Image: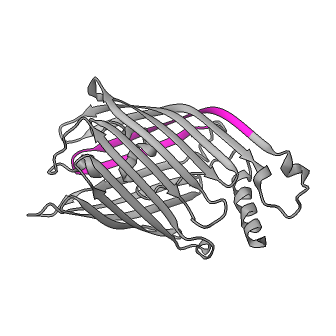
C-alpha cells in the first residue's frame, strides 16, 4: 500500500511540478497509422474520408499511469488541395484530465514527383487537476482537499508534410500555442520520415522510418522503426527508443480500406519493475475510395 501511495505521489508531482498545468506529451509508437495526430499537414493525404480511433495505455499495472484515447476524422473538400479534419483527444494521467477539441486545415501543393502540404490546427483545450482522489498517508490534508484546478484555453499548432507513393517526411509543432501560452522552450517539435521499398517479384514491402522529438529545449528523444509487410496484408516490425523502450509492432489489413494495428512497448528504464509494459491499439477505415494494392501509400503512410 505504501508503495502504491509513493508512486501515485511521484506521478502527480511530475504533472504539477513547475506549473500547475504543465502538459504531458503523448508518445505514440505507431504514429504512422495516424500521422495527423502529430502533424495537421498530414490530413487528407489519401484523398478520402479517413477515420482513425487510437487508444494507448502506458505503463499498464502502474497506478495513475497515462491513458489516452484519440479520434481523428479527415477528408478533402471540393478538390484534393484543400483538406479539413477533426481531432478529439482524452488524456488521463493520475488525477489530471486533459481534453482537446481541434479543427485541422491543410493546403496541399502538387509537384511532379511529390506533394507538399502546409497545415494548421486550432481549438479548445480543457485541463482539470483534482488532488482529492489521491491516496495519502494523512487523510486530513487541507491543501490537497482544496486543490482542484480547472482551466480552459485556446490551443494552436502548425506543420509541413512532404510525400509521394514511397516517401513521407514531416515536421510539426502541434502545441505551438497552448493553455499556458506561447513558450518556445517547452513547445514539442516532431520530425519524422520514412521510405517504402517494394520487394521484387512479390507483394512484400519493407519500410524503415524514424521519429525525432524535442519535448523541451534540452530534451530530445528519437525512435528507429522497421516494418515488413507480407503480401501487403500483414505487417510485423519493431521500434527502438533509446533509454526508454523496445517496441513490437503488428498491423493487419482486413480489407483494402480497413486496417488494425497493435503495439507493445517494453520499458528499458527502472520503471519496468513496477509496470507491465504499454499497449497501443489503432483502428483505421477509409471511405469513398477504392484502393489499389500496387500503390500502398494510403494504407501504410
**In the displayed structure image, the side of residue 288 where residue 129 appears, left or right:** right
Q: Is residue 153 magenta?
A: yes
Whether residue 142 is situated above or below residue 206 in the rendered picture: above
The structure residue drawn at horizontal position 90% and vertical position 50%, both measured from the top left corner, is 142
The structure residue drawn at horizontal position 14% and vertical position 60%, both measured from the top left corner, is 203
Residue in front for this viewpoint, 209 or 271: 271
Question: Residue 129 location in percent, x, y?
Answer: 72, 46
The structure residue drawn at horizontal position 50% and vertical position 41%, both measured from the top left corner, is 174
On the question of residue 172 being in view, the answer is no
Q: Quadrant of the N terminus?
A: bottom right
Q: Please tell me whether the stretch drawn in magenta is mainly helix, strand or loop.
A: strand
Residue that extends furthest to the top in the rendered view of this protein:
78
Question: Residue 287 location in percent, x, y?
Answer: 28, 37
Q: How many marks can you see?
A: 0
Whether residue 11 is situated above or below residue 1 in the rendered picture: above
- In the figure, residue 47 lies in which quadrant? top left
Residue in front for this viewpoint, 115 or 70: 70
Residue in front for this viewpoint, 167 or 95: 95
Q: Is residue 266 magenta?
A: no
**In the displayed structure image, the side of residue 240 where residue 48 appears, left or right:** left
Question: Residue 56 location in percent, x, y?
Answer: 50, 56
Magenta residue span: 150-178
**In the displayed structure image, the side of residue 172 where residue 19 appears, left or right:** right
Question: Residue 291 location in percent, x, y?
Answer: 19, 44
Name the image colouring.
one colour
Amino acid at each position: 500500500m505504501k508503495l502504491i501511495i509513493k508512486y501515485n505521489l511521484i506521478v502527480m508531482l511530475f504533472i504539477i511540478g513547475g506549473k500547475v498545468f504543465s502538459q504531458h506529451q503523448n508518445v505514440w509508437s505507431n504514429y504512422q497509422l495516424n500521422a495527423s495526430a502529430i502533424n495537421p499537414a498530414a490530413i487528407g493525404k489519401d484523398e478520402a474520408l479517413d477515420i482513425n480511433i487510437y487508444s494507448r495505455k502506458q505503463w499498464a499495472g502502474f497506478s495513475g499511469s497515462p491513458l489516452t484515447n484519440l479520434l481523428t476524422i479527415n477528408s478533402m473538400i471540393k478538390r484534393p488541395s484543400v483538406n479539413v479534419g477533426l481531432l478529439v483527444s482524452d488524456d488521463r494521467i493520475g488525477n489530471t484530465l486533459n481534453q482537446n477539441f481541434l479543427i485541422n486545415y491543410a493546403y496541399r501543393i502538387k509537384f511532379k514527383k511529390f506533394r507538399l502540404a502546409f497545415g494548421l490546427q486550432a481549438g479548445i483545450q480543457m485541463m482539470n487537476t483534482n488532488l482529492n482522489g489521491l491516496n495519502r498517508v494523512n487523510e486530513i490534508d487541507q491543501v490537497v482537499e482544496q486543490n482542484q484546478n480547472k482551466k480552459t484555453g485556446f490551443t494552436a499548432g502548425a506543420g509541413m508534410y512532404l510525400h509521394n507513393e514511397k516517401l513521407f517526411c514531416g515536421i510539426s509543432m502541434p502545441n505551438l500555442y497552448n493553455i499556458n501560452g506561447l513558450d518556445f522552450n517547452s513547445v514539442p517539435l516532431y520530425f519524422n520520415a520514412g521510405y517504402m521499398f517494394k520487394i521484387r517479384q512479390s507483394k512484400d514491402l519493407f519500410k524503415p522510418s524514424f521519429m525525432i522529438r524535442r519535448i523541451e529545449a534540452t530534451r530530445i528523444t528519437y525512435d528507429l522503426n522497421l516494418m515488413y509487410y507480407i503480401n501487403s496484408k500483414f505487417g510485423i516490425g519493431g521500434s527502438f527508443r533509446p533509454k526508454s523502450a523496445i517496441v513490437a509492432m503488428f498491423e493487419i489489413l482486413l480489407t483494402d480500406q480497413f486496417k488494425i494495428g497493435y503495439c507493445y512497448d517494453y520499458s528499458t528504464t527502472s520503471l519496468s519493475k513496477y509496470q507491465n509494459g504499454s499497449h497501443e491499439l489503432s483502428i483505421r477505415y477509409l471511405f469513398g475510395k477504392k484502393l489499389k494494392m500496387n500503390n500502398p501509400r494510403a494504407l501504410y503512410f
